[in-house]
Amino acid sequence: MKITVLSGGVGGARFLRGLRAAAPDAQITAIVNVGDDMWLSGLRIAPDLDSIMYTLAGENDEQRGWGRVGESERVSAELRAYGVGWPWFTLGDLDIGTHLARTSMLRDGLTLAEATDRITSRWQLGVHLIPASNDEVETHVVTESGEMHFQEWWTRHRAALPALSFVHHGLADASPAPGVLEAISDADVVLIAPSNPVVSIGPILAFESIHAAVSSAARVVGVSPIIAGAVVRGMADACLTAIGVATDADAVALHYGPTLLDGWLVDETDAALAPTIEAAGITARAVPLWMRDPASSAQVAGDALRLAQDL
């Protein structure tokens, strides 16, 4: 079985780890958000690619939910002493090693996808990671205080500044990375991970050709990142509010829409929302969605596959 997943962030990383366990014989490809990427202190940083890689490699910090386990932060302390970079955006020393490797490869002429293949070959991930694009397409947030990179809005301001809109700089001149459209069209199942719909999945679907490919895919099942009217992790509610979408499992399903989704998983506490989703032409199923550990993550991924098979 060929499975392609649109993914980003911690929720996407945990879902992919569960999917790998639920479908050990499948060929899994993850199309990963690059909207969070940026240049900082001379390094090309790709937060979602790295979070997913570290999680699948068993190298992530489970307590913080991001970064490498056993990190030190001596280099970031030195950069702050020199007044370089963002003092509120701390990179671990091991993580900086990844960014140095990526930057070196990019400057040697490799594309981001090629560099990602080189970097991920260090571990047996069981999932092929492809950045949504080799081009620099960065998400910025427009607020009353001005426009800023998503990472500044998210990390420095903790999404406390009301967002007026989200802008994907570079999108007009960008294209999907090689293999992205093929991974979607050739897949037996396309899954949308329980990632932030606006700033993790949104930048991927902002590519018209990717959106069209997913709309034409054989079976597309999404997993709600909203449980009982609240975000599972992070500040996705602030993002949804900015685009006029309620923080509810059915509202997010309708945001993606029946032209994109064939099926949608909601948590069992949101079972009452299923009729609204079904009325829109999307098959809904209520199951436990909390991904508290590898076993529960595998259960969620397995339920997504079972829904896809039943469509």
Image (cartoon, rainbow, N blue to C red):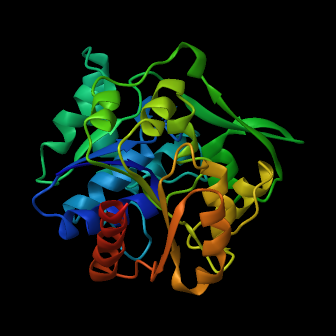
Q: Is residue 79 left or right of residue 307?
A: right
The residue positioned 58% from the left and 49% from the top of the image is 258
Q: Is residue 190 left or right of residue 243?
A: left
User: How far from the left and from the top, in percent, is residue 304?
Assistant: 36, 66
The residue positioned 38% from the left and 55% from the top of the image is 92
Q: Is residue 291 left or right of residue 113?
A: right
User: How far from the left and from the top, in percent, is residue 235?
Assistant: 66, 63
User: Can residue 290 be seen?
Assistant: yes
Residue lying farthest to the right in this orientation: 144
Above or below residue 274? Residue 278 is: above
User: How far from the left and from the top, in percent, is residue 145?
Assistant: 87, 41
Q: Where is residue 279, by image quadrant?
A: bottom right
User: How far from the left and from the top, in percent, is residue 120?
Assistant: 19, 44
| Numbered disc total | 0
Quadrant of the image for the C terminus? Answer: bottom left
User: Can residue 72 be seen?
Assistant: no
Q: Nearer the viewer, residue 81 or 31?
A: 31
Q: Nearer the viewer, residue 97 or 240?
A: 240
Q: Nearer the viewer, residue 36 or 80?
A: 36
Above or below residue 300? Residue 82 is: above
